[in-house]
Image (cartoon, rainbow, N blue to C red):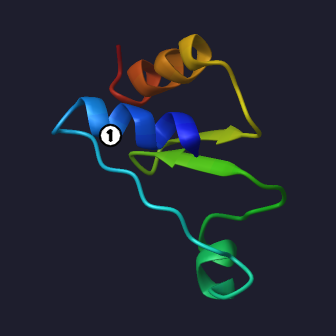
């Protein structure tokens, strides 16, 4: 989540939200959360766990179809 928020602070076109899934089980079900952290990018790409910034950037580009 830290990387997602860092990207959001650097670019006005990126937003990041953090949800405590134990408080919102319907969101955990919607995104099929089986581990945390789970980052969902554009509803299409999931990143499970903490990953280096360069890998996260690749996942963002993947979600954009690039």
Tell me where residue 19 appears, x and y as whole percent: 56, 70
Element on which disc 1 rests: helix
Q: How many marks?
A: 1
Residue at the spot 52% in from the left edge and 63% down from the top edge? 18
Q: Is residue 52 left or right of residue 33?
A: left
Instruction: Look at 47% across and 39% down and name the residue there.
Output: 4
Write down the residue under mark 1: 8
Q: Nearer the viewer, residue 11 or 63?
A: 11
Q: What residue is at 44 percent from the left and 51 percent from the top?
A: 43
Q: Quadrant of residue 34?
A: bottom right
19 to the left or right of 15: right
Q: Is residue 1 above or below residue 50?
A: below
Relative to 33, say whether 24 is above or below.
below
Q: Residue at x 55, y 24 (%)?
A: 56
Number of residues whose C-alpha sits closer than 10 Å to that of mark 1, classed few (under 14), some (14–19) or many (20 or more): some
Classify residue 61 as left or right of residue 26.
Answer: left
The x, y position of residue 58, in whole percent, is 50, 15
Residue 11 location (% of width, % of height): 22, 31
Q: Percent from the top left, x then y, of residue 22?
A: 74, 83
The C terminus lies in which quarter of the figure?
top left
Of 29 and 13, which appears nearest the observer? 13
Q: Which residue ends up furthest to the left in the rendered image?
A: 12
* Among the 4 quarters of the image, the one containing residue 13: top left
Asked if residue 52 lies left or right of residue 2, the reply is right
């Amino acid at each position: 989540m830290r990387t997602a928020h860092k990207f959001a602070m650097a670019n006005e076109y990126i937003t990041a939200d953090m949800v405590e899934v134990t408080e919102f089980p319907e969101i955990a079900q919607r995104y099929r959360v089986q581990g945390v952290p789970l980052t969902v990018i554009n509803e299409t790409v999931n990143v499970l766990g903490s990953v280096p910034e360069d890998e996260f950037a690749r996942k963002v580009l993947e979600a954009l179809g690039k």
